[in-house]
Amino acid sequence: MIAILTAAILAIALTVLAGTVPDLAWLPAAALAAWLVLAFLVLRRRGRSRPADAPRPVVVDGSNVMHWDDGTPDLAPVRAVVERLTAAGYAPGVMFDANAGYLLRGRYLRDRDFAGLLGLPRDRVMVVPKGTQADSYILTAARDMGAVIVTNDRFRDWAEQFPEVRDRGHLIRGGFRDGALRLALPGDPPLAGSGPGR
């Protein structure tokens, strides 16, 4: 990956030195993609070298969980899930679709906005780039960190590329019943009667 980034930078530098100005319209998207790949590589390295007693990483599908209480977008279910996971010894990170801020506040919200609203460090919250869905980012991050995913999404469209979504316990389902959060964490009773999104 570093070799690819170095080659891209070198190609741009040589083009500029040759006196031609390249069309750099693609540069912001490429820089964002490179940053995301590097961030996940760092997280993957952290995940592999964590001590046995360190909290287990878990990726929370924020755009799914925010609908769990009554189907209306709200951060309260996400906060409740983060608190429950932390109390159970997990290290939660939350990912949102780019439109999550519009659904919640009527405007785009960045990583740092959600981090502040959730009371999490900035490096534990990610809003995917505009025009994309979080699914591939969630699945890639979970794979790279050896994490489970909290969501009611089955990721059926991604099962061929990410067969681990079929593994028992990889996707932690949840919802609210009688106002109480229920998660299908290992060792918890099954979630009988929790329908989709609930």
Image: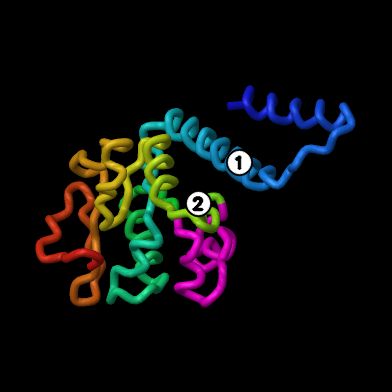
Give the residue at mark 1: 35
Left or right: residue 4 versus residue 90 is right
Where is residue 24 drawn, in percent x and y?
74, 43
Taking the spot 56% from the left edge, 73% from the top edge, the residue there is: 107
What secondary structure is marked by label 2? helix
Q: Nearer the viewer, residue 120 or 4?
A: 4
* Residue 48 horizontal/vertical position (percent): 43, 29
Is 80 left, or right, of 190 in this rendering? right
Dividing the picture into quarters, in which one does residue 167 lie? top left
Residue at the image point whose x is 39% and y is 43% from the top:
57
* Tag 1: amino acid: Trp
Q: Quadrant of the C terminus?
A: bottom left
Q: Position of residue 123 (x, y in %)?
A: 55, 50
Sequence-first disc among 1 and 2? 1
Q: In the figure, is residue 116 to the left or right of 12?
A: left
Q: Is residue 34 left or right of residue 132?
A: right
Which residue is label 2 attached to? Answer: 124
Q: Give the magenta range.
A: 95-122
Q: Is residue 108 magenta?
A: yes
